[in-house]
Amino acid sequence: MAAAIQAEELTKDYAIGFWRKRPYRALDRLSIAIEPGEVFGFLGPNGAGKTTTMKLLMQLVYPTSGRAEILGHPVGHVATRQRIGYLPENPYFYDYLTAEELLSYFAQLFGYPAADRAKRVSTLLDRVGIGAERRLQLRKFSKGMVQRVGIAQALINDPEVVFLDEPMSGLDPLGRRDVRTLILELREQGRTVFFSSHILADAQALCSRVAVVAGGRLAASGRVSDILAFEVRGWELVMSALRPEVIARLTPIAQRIVEISPGRYSIELALDHPPERVLADLTAAGASLVSLNPVHDTLEDYFVKRVAEAGSARPASIGAPRAGD
Amino acid sequence: MRAISCIAVNVFRESVRDRVPYNLVVFAVLLIASSFFLGQLTAGQDVKIIKDLGLAATSVFGLFIAIFIGIGLVSKEVERRSIYSLLSKPISRPQLVLGKYAGLVLTLAVNVAVMTVAQFAVLAYLTWTSDPAIQSAWDAPGIDPALLKAIALIFVELMLITAVAVFFSTFSTPLLSAALTFGLYLVGHFNADLRNFEVAVNSRTAAWIARGLYHVLPDLSAFDVKTQVVHGLPVPAGYLALTMGYGGLYIALLLLTATFIFSRRDFK
């Protein structure tokens, strides 16, 4: 099956400086493919190239080299936009319009007849939690409410592929929960969701696959379950009937010892300490094994490692990243 | 076409919500007030002054709307980043530029139409209250359909100025666009002088440059037939058609260049 979104060697250079312009590479040969129905998390620190990638996919900027396709058509193919939705980062909409009018205007651009427009607008505003405020001009909206309207406008055409640039930005915990639920609903409906985020817990909860970009380059990508399964950082032993003098012997080699209940301890060992030997010592000292599990990295640990690696690999000649990128 | 008309209607709605039509109230009050005062002060010249004032006000108010809304039409979208969500919809960049332009032309058309009605209302009142003997001394009748010729050319000129403003706003900041558009408006009204520049200077190069500029810059003085109309002089239909054709061609070239530039821009 053809990829819903595909980028090959996508590169973007910006000219920076006033008099003596010099190139700044915002994105460096990014290649990714997102299958239909996937929820794909695009992760990276500020200035990593996430928003640049989104803009390239929306053809708001043109690539220096490389190519990208959405639903089998080159980006910029106007008819394909009938099937996609996009929420920009920190969106701004015409503040003289009400939320209803804005959505109705966008629905009109998709060619929906008046009756259908009204129904769509009403349903979507209900879905993103905009109530009676829908008849207020957007200039009276808070940042979080504008973000909700932004999500609604991205879904006005029932898109097959949805691009969400920092969808949780500006939202309170309830708003974040609502957006998470919405993304899960989109996943259940078989839509493809490509979203960038700083909030790794959301990515871990929602995404089938993630990509980490840093310094304009793809630092890693893969299934969240695979990534974390391979990233074992040690072992966790849970033992019972453990005496205090035995615990004292473990202190030099254990990374962390936590007493769960009287006589029962959780002991975390580094990867270079084979758990078999420790287990043999402890059972010989009269303790009983409750459980032995590998300790995996969280997505955050993985993210920090990959970003650090990419940072050290980045050539010094490349300029400083732009804020908010 | 659907996308262009949607965008155009939205531009019109924006100008209404930004209280642009308020200038119509100012215009109507100005005209009505002047008709009463001038009627008291002048003898037989009041109809000319009202026509002059009405046409000049239509032109100046329209110019302000064309420049100050025109320069922000595209650049404001880019600056405020509302263009991001707009361009993700099934519209092309040329459609966006043309829709914005059409929206402002619609705003101008409504403004000019209301101003025209106000002007004819004041002239009708003046005709109705003036003695027939005084009316017979007027160069042209009070309610003169020839006024519509002058208004039509003013409207085409305003369309051209709007196209200039939109053209600059596709690649420049609003402030610079305003300065350039206003500069071009001024130069355009003195453009006819460039044609005969060689008579005034000795330098062949300067004369050659002036002649080049004459051909490139719009000749806005061609759209000004206010004096002829006010004094009851004829404005031939051929001249009207030719000038409108010239305006239409210039507008088409400006919009074509604007869409070409806009289609290649990066929105960082």
Image: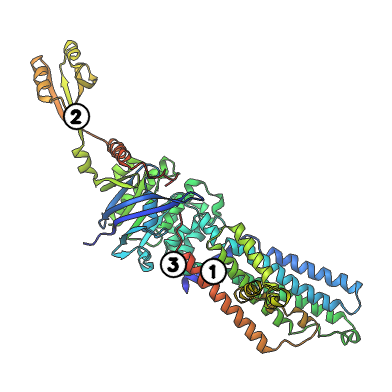
Whether the residues at callouts 1 and 3 have beta carbons within 8 Å, the answer is: no
- Name the chain under label 2: A
Q: Quadrant of the N terminus of chain A?
A: bottom left
- Name the chain under label 3: B
Bin the neighbour count of mark 1 within 10 Å (Cα to Cα): few under 14, some 14-19, many 20 and up.
Answer: many
Name the one closer to the observer, A304 or B88. A304
Apparent side of residue A238 relative to residue B220 in the rendered image (left or right): left
Quarter of image, res A156: bottom left
Name the one closer to the observer, A316 or A97. A316
Q: Is residue B65 visible?
A: no
Q: Which residue is mark 1?
A: B8
Apparent side of residue B44 relative to residue A240 in the rendered image (left or right): right
**Residue A89: x %, y % from top left:** 43, 50
Q: Residue at x 54, y 76 (%)?
A: B252
Name the one closer to the observer, B83 or B9. B83
Which three-letter amino acid code belongs to the residue tagged 2? Gly
B57 is higher (above) or lower (below) than A202: below
**Residue B209: x %, y % from top left:** 62, 72
Tag 2 and tag 1 share a subunit: no
Name the one closer to the observer, A291 or A252. A252
Of the image marks 1 and 3, the number of the one nearer the N terminus: 1
Quarter of image, res B37: bottom right
Which three-letter amino acid code belongs to the residue tagged 1? Ala
Q: Secondary structure at mark 2?
A: strand
Bin the neighbour count of mark 2 within 10 Å (Cα to Cα): few under 14, some 14-19, many 20 and up.
Answer: some
Alpha-carbon span between mark 3 and mark 2: 54 Å
Q: Residue at x 32, y 64 (%)?
A: A74
Apparent side of residue A53 relative to residue A224 in the rendered image (left or right): right
Q: Which residue is mark 3?
A: B91
Q: Secondary structure at mark 1?
A: helix
On residue A234, the disc is 2
